[in-house]
């Protein structure tokens, strides 16, 4: 709901503020008084193009600000959150500023935004109908929403869309798996060859490094064995073996151990050294017995090492374990080739199940829409006759489309015949601006309880009608305004008489300059103004009485 509209330095408006009623507001005034200027200023906060020509006073900028009540509008709160904009619990403030240089800035809740963001949000807040506008009544989404609202499809449509998006997601996953399979198939043979090569080599952890160390030892086996034999000889088998000499020295000191306090400790150390040398001699003998030059084994190790180095070079690695990691990775790839067919089959099955669910719901949606066509056509055509279009007819076509889409498997088209010619054409092509506005009024009056409609603004909806037709338009607008805020610019007293708030636009001279202003009329002022609309500047008593009756009703 639009609570307040503030306009500053726009065309011949110096400064004005309008506090709107939450129900039906009408704006009247003489031709040229500035009603269209107010709508033009409003268009700025709806995201229309700015022009510095509207600045009469070039010394200050033009400002248009609208304060909206959006307390119960979830879509608006989601938009603010999705665009990282400050969200008041109740109010949304749209502001547009135009500098003398023509540069325009837009704000939502005092945060600068681009024009696209302003247009997106304002379309949720205001539904503006002007002469020659391209109205949403000609848009496929709105046409479908009307039938869905009448059919009470909200829950079914939510379920369908959830399944539709799940189906789309699973379908993409399946396509990705098939593409992955194609890539796998291209390299599967090469991966199999590489894996077979590594598996045939059969390396174990750290084997190449251990083989290299063993080969170096065997290559020096004779030298190692000779050195070990010499050590063992000196320790155990020479004429004066070291182990035996240490034992003799220990015995010589034992004789005098009781005569000197330090000798027992020294004897103990000699004994320990003798035991350690004996152990070394035994270890040298053990190692020597295992060191043997083996040409055949050396040849086998060389071949093994050559195979290992060749594979490491091929795969660009430095260790056995890295080679084994590559082998494991290749095995995973080969296993994935085997598994992917199973995955594809499972995804195809899941996709088929979701598709069938979606089709069943799409059929349900289509049937529900088709059931609404005839009663909807009849109601709209009756309303069209009431609002001065007795020869106009609306025809609704529900056609099955190719495949599923976000809203089902059908399309909805509103066709229009203005003159009982049976030549039905898309609304946008054949309806005039006034006809479109009245048609939109008729349609929205039928779905106002089911669709979350924004503030509706009708500019010149009464073009080409008067008398009873105008009265009927007023009645329909009044009924609609009981549930949605309505703002209407009109020349018809029958419509003005239905207002909850009546605003009068007028021109006045301020400091030798013509300015447009607006004020809300009192009950008596309304009667006088409507009487003037009926019979001229000097209304008759009958006109005043007629006006009083219109306002009273």
Image: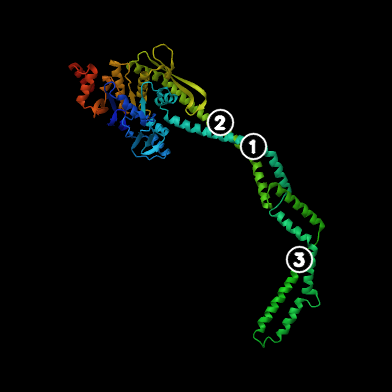
Disc marking residue 352 = 2
- Estimate how packed mark 2 is, as few (under 14), some (14 to 19) or many (20 or more) residues with alpha carbons within 10 Å: some
Q: Position of residue 532 (x, y in %)?
A: 22, 19
| Residue assigned mark 3 | 287
| Residue assigned mark 1 | 183
Classify residue 250 as left or right of residue 179: right
How far apart in space, not on screen, are marks 2 and 1 (Cα)?
25 Å
Q: Which is more toward the observer, 502 or 153? A: 502
First along the sequence among labels 1 and 3: 1
Q: Secondary structure at mark 2?
A: helix
Q: Which is more toward the observer, 47 or 14? A: 14
Vertically, is 29 above or below 273? above
Q: Position of residue 468 (x, y in %)?
A: 28, 16
Q: Position of residue 376 (x, y in %)?
A: 39, 20
Which one is in front in this view, the residue at disc 1 or the one at disc 3?
1
How far apart in space, not on screen, are marks 1 and 3 (Cα)?
56 Å
């Amino acid at each position: 709901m639009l609570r307040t509209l503030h306009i500053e330095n726009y065309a011949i408006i110096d400064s004005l503020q309008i506090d709107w009623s939450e129900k039906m507001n009408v704006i009247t005034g003489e031709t040229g008084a500035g009603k269209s200027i107010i709508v033009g200023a409003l268009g700025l906060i709806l995201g229309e193009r700015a022009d510095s020509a509207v600045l009469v006073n070039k010394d200050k900028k033009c400002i248009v600000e609208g304060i909206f009540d959006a307390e119960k509008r979830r879509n608006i709160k989601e938009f603010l959150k999705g665009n990282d904009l400050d969200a008041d619990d109740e109010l949304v403030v749209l502001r547009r500023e135009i500098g003398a240089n023509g540069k325009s800035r837009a704000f939502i809740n005092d945060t600068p935004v681009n024009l696209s963001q302003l247009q997106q949000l304002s379309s949720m807040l205001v539904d503006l109908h002007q002469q020659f506008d391209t109205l949403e009544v000609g848009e496929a989404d709105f046409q479908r929403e009307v039938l869905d609202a009448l059919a009470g499809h909200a829950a079914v449509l939510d379920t369908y869309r959830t399944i539709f998006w799940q189906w789309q997601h699973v379908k993409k996953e399946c396509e990705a798996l098939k593409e992955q399979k194609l890539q796998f198939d291209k390299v599967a043979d090469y991966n199999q060859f590489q894996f077979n090569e590594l598996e045939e080599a059969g390396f174990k952890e750290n084997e190449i490094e251990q083989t290299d160390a063993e080969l170096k030892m065997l290559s020096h086996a004779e030298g190692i064995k000779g050195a070990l034999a010499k050590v063992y000889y000196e320790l155990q088998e020479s004429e004066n073996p070291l182990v035996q000499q240490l034992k003799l020295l220990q015995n010589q000191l034992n004789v005098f151990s009781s005569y000197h306090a330090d000798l027992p400790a020294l004897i103990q150390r000699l004994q320990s050294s003798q035991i350690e040398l004996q152990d070394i001699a035994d270890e040298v003998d053990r190692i020597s017995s295992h060191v043997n030059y083996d040409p055949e084994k050396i040849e086998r190790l060389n071949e093994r090492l050559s195979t290992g180095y060749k594979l490491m070079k091929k795969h660009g690695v430095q260790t056995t374990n890295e080679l084994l990691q590559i082998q494991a990775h290749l095995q995973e790839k080969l296993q994935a080739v085997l598994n992917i067919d199973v995955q594809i089959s499972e995804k195809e099955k899941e996709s088929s199940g979701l598709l069938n669910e979606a089709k069943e719901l799409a059929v349900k949606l289509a049937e529900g829409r088709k059931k609404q066509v005839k009663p909807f056509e009849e109601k709209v055509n009756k309303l069209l006759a009431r609002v001065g279009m007795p020869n106009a007819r609306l025809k609704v076509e529900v056609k099955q489309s190719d495949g599923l889409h976000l809203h089902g498997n059908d399309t909805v088209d509103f066709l229009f015949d203005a003159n009982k010619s049976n030549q039905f054409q898309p609304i946008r092509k054949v309806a005039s601006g006034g006809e479109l506005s009245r048609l939109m009024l008729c349609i929205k009056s039928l779905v106002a309880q089911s669709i979350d409609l924004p503030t509706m603004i009708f500019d010149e909806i009464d073009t080409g009608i008067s008398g009873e037709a105008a009265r009927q338009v007023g009645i329909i607008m009044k009924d609609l305004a009981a549930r949605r805020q309505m703002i209407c610019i009109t020349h018809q007293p029958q419509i003005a008489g239905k207002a909850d708030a009546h605003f009068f636009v007028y021109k006045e001279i301020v400091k030798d300059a013509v300015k447009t202003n607006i004020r809300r009329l009192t009950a008596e002022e309304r009667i006088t103004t409507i009487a003037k609309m009926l019979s001229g500047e000097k209304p008759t008593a009958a006109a005043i009485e007629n006006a009083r009756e219109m306002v009273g009703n």
